[in-house]
Amino acid sequence: MPSPADEIRRFEPAADDAAALAATTALRDRFRSALAPVVVGQRDLLDDLLAVVVCGGHCLIEGVPGLAKTLVVKSLARALDLDFGRIQFTPDLMPADITGTDVLEEDRGSGIRRLRFLPGPLFANVLLADEINRAPPKTQAAVLEAMQERQVTVGGVSHPLPDPFFVLATRNPLDQEGTYPLPEGQLDRFMFLLRVDYPKRADELEIVRRTTGSEAPTVDSVIERASIAAAARIVHALPIADHVLEHAIDLVRSTRPGSEREPEWLPRLLRHGAGPRASQFLVLASKAHAALDGRPCVEIRDVHRAAPTVLRHRLITTFEADSEGITPDEIVSRLIGLRARSG
């Protein structure tokens, strides 16, 4: 059976490209408007989340408690008219708790016993994996299969997950006690790592006004699944010039110590760089940003816009970089500057 990605690759651009792009931009505007009653500010976060959705990827969201990460994900599912599921990850959570399990049933009439699969909370279009790094490695591995294969295996039988299927996971960057750090292989499955910062003063004032009044804001379902699929086809079909494609690939390759694109200062700061999956995600994310902005081709600014979110969780810094407080974001910024100057 062909995967959704295979179906997208066979897409042929519509004759009226301008109308198709306009519809994609309108989808973004409807999404912003739908979430405006409950999400104050955070426009870049919302745009990045929509880009992940139209690319069919998964996303890791990082931020301290109380910054409305759960609210944003739940509101996204509501606006897109998708089934929402939430799993609170804890150290005692087992794979069967999230994937589901086989139960033995007996037919009262015939006395025949048979196994029936009871799906777990993983079977949702939008899955919020809350504090995913608190789950043990065995449970994290079950999520990994779901993210990569879009199916779960129980008792030797594979069960396909709903289509579409997105994992939006959160983690707290401060409280690391009792956590199991995500292995590099699982981090690499996430298309983006998004960071949620404290709101600006004006935004916080508006948040307090809305949440302490008598009326509770709501989110309406404004986008059909067919519109998401159409936007995904537009994104994959969007052209990218050779020099922009090469710029994106060279940017990723420059993160790898020992590569021909490596700047001389890089080995002091990085132990490992980003792999080919990062190149794929960077190009796809650049296409998504261009399409959602209504532009008919990818520009270098789209590559630079997507680079921090795609690369920051794929770069493993050295002890020297950590001791000097040099973050992956700073390294990506330096590399973007070097690539921009070199043309």
Image (tube, helix red, strand yellow):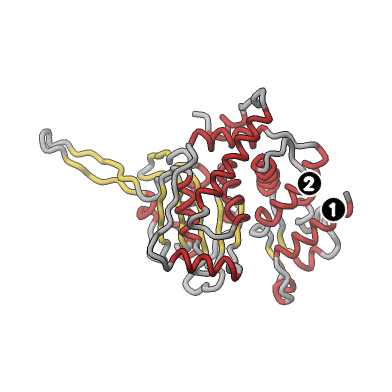
**Foreground: 100 or 192?**
192
- Left or right of 312 on screen, residue 178: left
**Foreground: 131 or 33?**
33
Which residue was labeled with disc 2? 300
Percent of width and height locating residue 180: 50, 66
**Foreground: 89 or 62?**
62
- Left or right of 195 on screen, residue 269: right
- Residue type at the position of mark 1: Ala
Q: Residue at x 50, y 65 (%)?
A: 207
Q: Residue at x 83, y 58 (%)?
A: 337
Vertical placement of 333 versus 32: above or below?
Answer: below
Can the viewer see residue 6 in this picture? yes
Q: Residue at x 30, y 42 (%)?
A: 117
Number of the label disc, if any, that sits on residue 340: 1
Q: Residue at x 69, y 47 (%)?
A: 282
Percent of width and height locating residue 104: 23, 44
Number of the label disc, if any, that sits on residue 309: none
Which secondary structure, mark 1? helix
Vertical placement of 228 versus 220: above or below?
Answer: above
Which secondary structure, mark 2? helix
**Disc 1: CA contacts within 10 A as few (<14), some (14-19) or many (>=20):** some
Residue found at the far right of this picture: 342
**In which quadrant of the rendered view does residue 173 lie?**
bottom right
The disc, 1 or 2, on the residue closer to the chain's N-terminal end is 2
Percent of width and height locating residue 280: 68, 43
**Disc 2: CA contacts within 10 A as few (<14), some (14-19) or many (>=20):** some
- Residue type at the position of mark 2: Ile
